[in-house]
Image (spheres, rainbow, N blue to C red):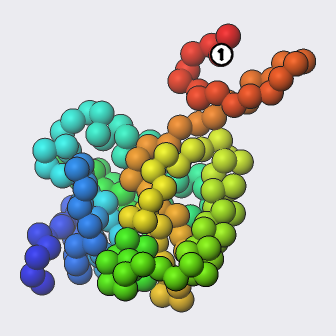
């Protein structure tokens, strides 16, 4: 395999097939889970970020929040694995790539399909909001396509929980940062 460094977990469970993308803090690989014989996507913190406690905490937080969001329109998180200094987020692999990749290959999306994409992702956003989670980074790179062209919401930024604050005169949502809402 060219272009993708070997990723080996302690037991050699995941075999890298290709690089799907790279950001400021992590690289995402398409892998074969040799134990389950299933393709997965694995997000690995980059070496310069892997030892930064805040980066590790954010990836673990992202994994916990995404794992709680069981919805067909949200990319499933299967596991978080620590292997020495490396931290891996094991996720569902969306064979159709990202909307950003689609746009790069095909150019502007026809208006009808763009509306279909937006409408398709709304139930996933609603499910996240119902669970008290804000996506914070909805963009073409985080909208994935299945082999059948269905849209799934992925993400690469930690989500925040929402807290509902109620009084006799108003209801509002406030970001829960562990502090009194006043």
Query: Please, is residue 7 above or below residue 131 in the view?
Result: below
In the image, 131 versus 129, the foreground residue is: 129
Task: Name which residue lies at 53% across and 24% down.
Answer: 177
- Position of 85 compared to 126: left or right? left
In the image, 35 versus 57, the foreground residue is: 57
- Position of 122 compared to 83: left or right? right
Task: Name which residue lies at 35% across and 37% down.
Answer: 57
Q: Position of residue 81 (x, y in %)?
A: 33, 54
Q: Residue furthest top?
A: 182
Query: Please, is residue 124 above or below residue 52 in the view?
Result: below
Residue bearing mark 1: 181
- Mark 1: secondary structure: loop
User: Which quarter of the figure has residue 106?
Assistant: bottom left
Task: Name which residue lies at 43% across and 73% down.
Answer: 99
Residue 78 in view: no
Q: Residue furthest right?
A: 168
Task: Name which residue lies at 55% across and 20% down.
Answer: 178
Q: Position of residue 25 (x, y in %)?
A: 24, 49
Q: Position of residue 29 (x, y in %)?
A: 27, 70
Say which quadrant the N terminus sits in.
bottom left
Residue 152 in view: yes
In the image, 80 versus 119, the foreground residue is: 119
Q: Position of residue 145 (x, y in %)?
A: 48, 78
């Amino acid at each position: 395999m060219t272009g993708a460094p070997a990723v080996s977990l302690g037991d050699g469970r995941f075999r890298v097939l290709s690089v799907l993308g790279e950001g400021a803090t992590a690289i995402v690989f398409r892998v074969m889970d040799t134990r389950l014989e299933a393709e997965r996507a694995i997000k690995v913190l980059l070496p310069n970020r892997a030892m930064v406690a805040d980066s590790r905490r954010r990836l673990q937080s992202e994994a916990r929040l995404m794992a709680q969001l069981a919805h067909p329109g949200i990319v499933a998180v299967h596991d978080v694995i620590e292997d020495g200094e490396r931290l891996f987020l094991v996720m569902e692999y969306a064979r159709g790539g990202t909307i950003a990749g689609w746009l790069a290959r095909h150019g502007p999306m026809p208006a009808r399909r763009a509306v279909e994409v937006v409408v398709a992702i709304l139930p996933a956003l609603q499910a996240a909001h119902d669970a008290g989670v804000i996506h914070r980074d909805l963009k073409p790179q985080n909208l994935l396509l299945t082999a059948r062209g269905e849209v799934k919401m992925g993400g690469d930024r930690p989500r925040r929980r929402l807290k509902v604050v109620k009084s006799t005169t108003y209801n509002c949502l406030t970001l829960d940062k562990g502090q009194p809402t006043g």
